[in-house]
Image (spheres, rainbow, N blue to C red):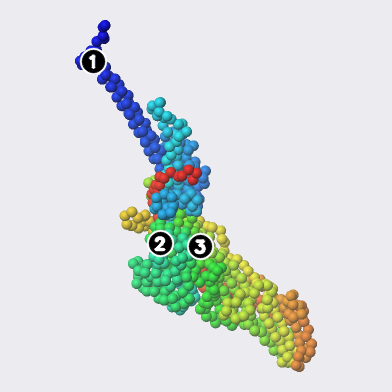
Amino acid sequence: MTHPSFRKGPQAQRGATAVFAAAALVAMLTAALLAIDVGRLYIAKRDLQKLANVAALDASRLVSGCAVDDAPFQLPGAGELQEFVEQTVADNGLGSDLLDSAQVEVGTVERRGEDDDGPAGTRFLAVDGADVQAVRVTLRRSFPQPLMPLLPYDEGRTMVASATAGQLAVGSFYLGSGLLSLDGGILNALLSGLLGGNVNLTVLDYNGLADVGVSLEALALAVGLEVEDLSDPLALQTQTPLLSDAIDGLAGALSGTASGTITGLLGDLAAVAANGDNLPVPLGQIIGEVDDTAAAAPFVNLLDLLIALGAAANADDSGSVAPIALPVSLSLPGLASVHTFVQILEPPQFSGMQRAGVAEAHTAQVKLLVRARVDALNSVTQALNLLLLGGLLGQVTAPPIALGVDVNVAEGRAWLDRIQCPRSSDPTLAADLSANASVATIKLGTFSGAPSAAPAITNGLAQLLGVTIKILGGLIAEIKVNLFLQAPVETTAGNPSPVPLQTVDAFTKVDQASGARPYWLADEAPQTPYNPQTVGTTGLLSGTMSTLFSSMQITASDPAHPNASSSICLLRVIVCTLSIPVGSVLDAVLNPVVALLGTLLNGVGGIVDAIIDPLLQALGIQIGSATVTMNAISVDQPRIISTEVPAAGS
């Protein structure tokens, strides 16, 4: 039997080596292809993330207003943002499959708490946030087809990349009191009424207070809150400071920047408030929504802030402050007495550091009240002498006329319309603002009661003057003539239409610590002619009172009480033997009296005009005009906030 023979030696081992080499080559090729596929996946995901970052950064410039050239800035709609992002993807994209996969969302940036989903302290986009601060772009694309056809591949699978970006572009301004002529006495009375004590500062003191800027950081420090808590209703409700503590806190917060004279004045004012009612201050009434952005930038002057704090503390449920008597001493012919009051119906509100299209401020809504007694005896006697044979037959008595004037100054408003951010092509930093001036409603009528108590003007028909004529001491006849004002008269001064202001483009950069957000302070006059700037026309009340007085309708009869308006009492012994109602008759007979009374009142109108204009100016109330002061702008580069992919369905 023959057996096959096997080769022995090196030649016999060559075939086994080839098999192992072939298997190793296949394994190496597979590993190389897997490595290439993994690299392709990594590069595809990296490029997708880069594209999401670029699209989000570009969109954040649009949302912040830095990429908008027109004023006023309006937040772009969903369609406009979607189109903008798709164009960015098309310009920088990796294929047309990305164009229909861009999801664009805007919202507020918030931080996670300990009880929230996700790592505590990380920032995320709250899509339902009230204030749009950032934009999130989410892109999807199919996975690259693997190089090895034998590997499983699902065409429906997509890779996802997301980026949330925001750009800081905010500004602060205030619609100030525009104190045209500081009057120590009047402002002392105003602050005394708001603080609840006796304030006695000089005009120099008030100028010093008005020259000090207060930042959000200083205000927050003064009331023991974080800056972002100034717009948190819960924080303000649980930590509302007392008025004296807020003022004393300002003294401490400003100790490093304001002079010792100013901090000393604040200490004195805090002591005045502590000795008064010392009411809590609802800060939410004067500070809009704020955050810690550029908190060191001043947003209001100290005097305006003090008045706003006092007004907010003293406001009732309707937001009004009780009338505060002003020290007006007049000795004018025809005026028996004059009492003036100011009533803050709504405190001023300051913009804080806000975005264009969001930042807004309004002045205080104020009512100036004048309550006067006018001596009408001489004019009435002259008219009645025609009926009494030169006064030989009788004696005339006429008490002073009660006249009230209410000047209700509605709030003026101002808006930050656009911030021009510095760019490589144009490094100019600028701000566009607009404002509408305050409008005044002037009401003239009569009142009942003591003028020193600031009684309300009587609505409807009311007695204006009561005249008593006694013939031969009243033994023959006693005539009572009541003159009635048919209704109060009103007029309006000013135009409420918004007016664009001149662009403010002179700013000085403030050096900050490393890592802090940069901000620029707006230069003021004389460095720039447009800060502050006033819109509207002043002096709109000139002659207003005289016009109102001439439109008053005076009658001798009371249609509601025809038998009691005016009467003649004949043959008075103990009681009136015969009483004859003569109101309708006197309407015709007393035309000379009414005419002369109208002349008297027209003259009083000029006197009241002379009272009101200086008072309004001294209080910083500008009818028909508004003074806007730009404070600061903070602009940063667009930044990626998060690359977290939103949860499915969010």
Question: Which of label 1 and label 3 is nearer to you?
Answer: 1
Please give the count of numbered marks on the rendered protein.
Answer: 3
- N-terminal of the pair, mark 1 or mark 2, is 1
Q: Which mark is residue 12?
A: 1
Q: Helix, strand or loop at disc 2?
A: loop
- N-terminal of the pair, mark 1 or mark 3, is 1
- Give coordinates of residue 243: x percent, y percent: 45, 71
Q: Hey, what amino acid is under mark 3?
A: His
Q: Quick one: label 3, few (<14), some, or many (20+) residues within 10 Å?
A: many
Residue behind mark 2: 226
- N-terminal of the pair, mark 2 or mark 3, is 2
Q: Residue at x 45, y 71 (%)?
A: 242
Q: Helix, strand or loop at disc 3?
A: strand
Relative to 509, residue 246 above or below: below
Q: Which mark is residue 286?
A: none
Relative to 164, residue 434 above or below: below
